[in-house]
Image (cartoon, helix red, strand yellow):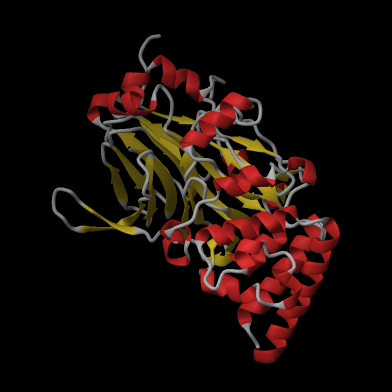
Amino acid sequence: MGTVSRIFPFGGTCNNYEWGRKGSKSLAARLCAASPETDFKIDEEKRYSEMWFGDYPNFPGRLGDGRPLGDVLRDHKNELLGEHSVGKWGDQLPHLPKILSIAKALPLQVHPNKDLAAKLHTQNPEQFTDPNHKPEIAIALSHFELFAGWKELDEIAQLFRTPFLRGVMPPSAASSSRWTDETLREVVRALLKADADSVRAMQAELAVQLEADFKKGGAHRASHLLRVLRDLQAQCTDLDPGALVAVLCMNFLTLDPGEAIFIPADGVHCYLSGDVFECMARSDNMLAGGLCPAADRDHADVFCDALRFGDLTRPRGIRLPAQTVRDPATGLVDHNAARFAPPVGEFDVLRVALLAGREQALRPARGPTVAIVLRGEGTLVGDDDDDGREVRLMQGQIFFVAANTAATVRATEDLELYATVGG
């Protein structure tokens, strides 16, 4: 197997889901095309939804000589991944980073927890391709709109007291004076199982209600939700029950660049538009409940039984604030970096923003680091034990830093990068 450098560049792989942005409007495509490790060319007639730059086999990262990243990591697992990561997560990256460029709504979805993922993988390995969970974070790179988690129960219950929604309420909800999480689960189940005529009628009445709310008090949120409902109807028709679940029951959020959210395993969400840096535990499992063709939806009972409730799915628990980074030797604040630390063991995300002429130490971590340059130029310099290996940095450059390895980023132009750091 020979020796391997502990820092090296590699390239990502773009995919073409229908919800992606077209041609060079897609940040994912532009970054992939800019990478010197790929020969990717943008076709202005195609949609480019994601660039993956991990070792997952669906859309694997590759070195400049064409070798899949996963093969290199398995051949040199202890040197590159580190004994801690190999012992805990196996001979693969514990995380999967992506760039998303979203023009249309993704499906209303949850990513199953480990127990359910293992069960689904055994039952249907073609659809559920691994037995792992998939908690994830999404960091906005542009204006980012999404639905995530649940509104407060009292707010949802109030909405369902309107006449046009009473008919869909299950007996447990209709007879309850105070809703619980299980009440909400059954309401979502009833919405997803409603017949097409009922879904169309409820969507029409909901649009009328939102327009009336906006005109009555100039309610800003009602205006946004009416616009989003119209967009979802245009994309998915007014027969898709997922729009009702999203608008009636879920939090509509807008994020500015640099703001982040955390979605736990089994957490309901639907991304609507924007460019996003996303990182998740290494998995590609998804249950779809709506906002997609009927043939692509999973059974409503499987979807609803998986739904998670609790603090991490409420408004305050969804947003993931950036944490201050301090120099471990001096305790001083590092103003060039910010850390996003989700409550999972597989990864943190580090954002580095440097002015020209500045540098940033990437300190040794117990697990592997994968990073992408969003803008600017510079160099990545390895420590002396790696013979001072240098990687030229430019927009779209992706690089790997092995576990327990120190490196330094030096900016020759203003530079911004995001790095996933293995736990």
Q: Residue at x 26, y 41 (%)?
A: 363
Residue 157 appearing in the image: yes
Residue 29 appearing in the image: no
The image shows residue 145 at horizontal and vertical percentages of 60, 63
Which quadrant holds residue 205? bottom right
Quadrant where the image shows the C terminus:
top left
Q: Residue at x 66, y 78 (%)?
A: 222
The image shows residue 377 at horizontal and vertical percentages of 45, 47
- In the picture, measured across the screen, residue 346 lies left or right of residue 329, that is right
The image shows residue 217 at horizontal and vertical percentages of 65, 90
- Foreground pick, 339 / 87: 87
- Foreground pick, 39 / 199: 199
Q: Residue at x 71, y 71 (%)?
A: 166
- Foreground pick, 270 / 54: 270
The image shows residue 302 at horizontal and vertical percentages of 63, 42
Q: Is residue 256 above or below residue 357?
A: below
Q: Is residue 124 above or below residue 342?
A: above
Q: Is residue 17 above or below residue 312?
A: above
Q: Residue at x 60, y 60 (%)?
A: 146
